[in-house]
Every structure is written in structure tokens, then in C-alpha cells.
Amino acid sequence: MRIRIRIGKMEVFAALKKTPTAEKIWGALPFGSRAETWGQEVYFSVPVNVALEADAREVVDSGTVCFWTQGNCLAIAFGPTPISKGAECRLADRCNIFGKLEGDPRTLRDVRSGEDVRVERAAGNEKLDERETP
């Protein structure tokens, strides 16, 4: 599964892992929101409620796509946040890990709070009819 995230005039893509959170997000697509920033993290509310998963983490790799269960937000850290120790990407709480951005996550540096967000299924996710040959 792959999604497109448009924030203002910017567009990024993310590959989703097979997790309960990813399935919920996938089922809610498409949706819109407003971007917020916190240090080098972009986050925005989503129309999904999910429980904290067993492998939830607070410190993640740059470009990891996460779900903050306490705020019902999708969060993408691409560098230090106000509570980071050194250069780590530290989220506000433990979050469900459900994807990874494709390309350089530092492109998110240009995102400003209040920008419109649109999340949708990316092209290429359609299943082939079994009678068709790739």
C-alpha cells in the first residue's frame, strides 16, 4: 500500500506496512486536514481512532510515518523535536509505526503550520484482474 500526502504545494509519498493502523488509515482515505509543526516534525489530525500497538515507539528514524493515538494524528518526524536528545527524532509519546516516506524526508522542512493537507491512495495500488497479465 502506498499513499500520497499533499501539504500546501508539496507532495510526498509513503509506503505503508501491514499493520492494524495502516489498514485503518487506508480504509479512511481520502481525507483532508491542516498541518501542524513541532520542531522537525509535521503532524495532522486524521479521521481514525486506533489503539496503541505493542511495537509503538517514541524514538524513530527520520521519515517514519507514525500514528499518535492520544491525538488521533498522523506524525512524520524528519529531525529533532523540542524533546529530542541530540539529533534523534523523538515524538511526544509512543506512537504506532505504520509506514516510511519515500525519498528525502527533509523536504518537509518547508511545511508551515496551517497549510492544507490531503492524503489519498497513490496510483499503482489497484489490484490487477486475475485474468490480466502484468
Image (cartoon, helix red, strand yellow):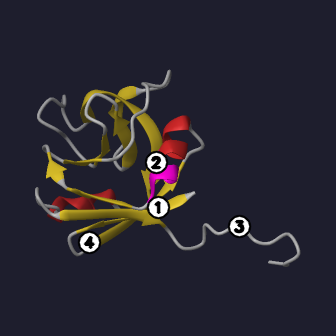
Magenta run includes residue 93: no
Secondary structure state at the residue bearing disc 1? strand
State the separation of the CA atoms marked 3 and 4. Answer: 27 Å
First to last magenta residue range: 25-29
Say which residue label 1 marks.
3
**Which label's residue is closer to the chain start, 1 or 4?**
1
Say which residue label 2 marks.
25
Would residue 79 be seen by someone viewing this image from the given angle? yes
Say which residue label 4 marks.
10
State the separation of the CA atoms marked 4 and 2. Answer: 20 Å
**Which label's residue is closer to the chain start, 1 or 2?**
1
**Which label's residue is closer to the chain start, 3 or 4?**
4
Secondary structure state at the residue bearing disc 2? helix
Say which residue label 3 marks.
127
Q: Which amino acid is tagged 4? A: Met
Q: Which amino acid is tagged 2? A: Ile
89 lies above or below 106: above
Within 10 Å of the Cα at label 4, are there few (<14), some (14-19), or many (20+) other Cα atoms? Answer: few
103 lies above or below 43: below
**Which label's residue is closer to the chain start, 3 or 2?**
2
State the separation of the CA atoms marked 3 and 2. Answer: 18 Å
Q: Position of residue 88 (x, y in %)?
A: 26, 36
Q: Which amino acid is tagged 1? A: Ile
Of marks 1 and 3, the one in the foreground: 3
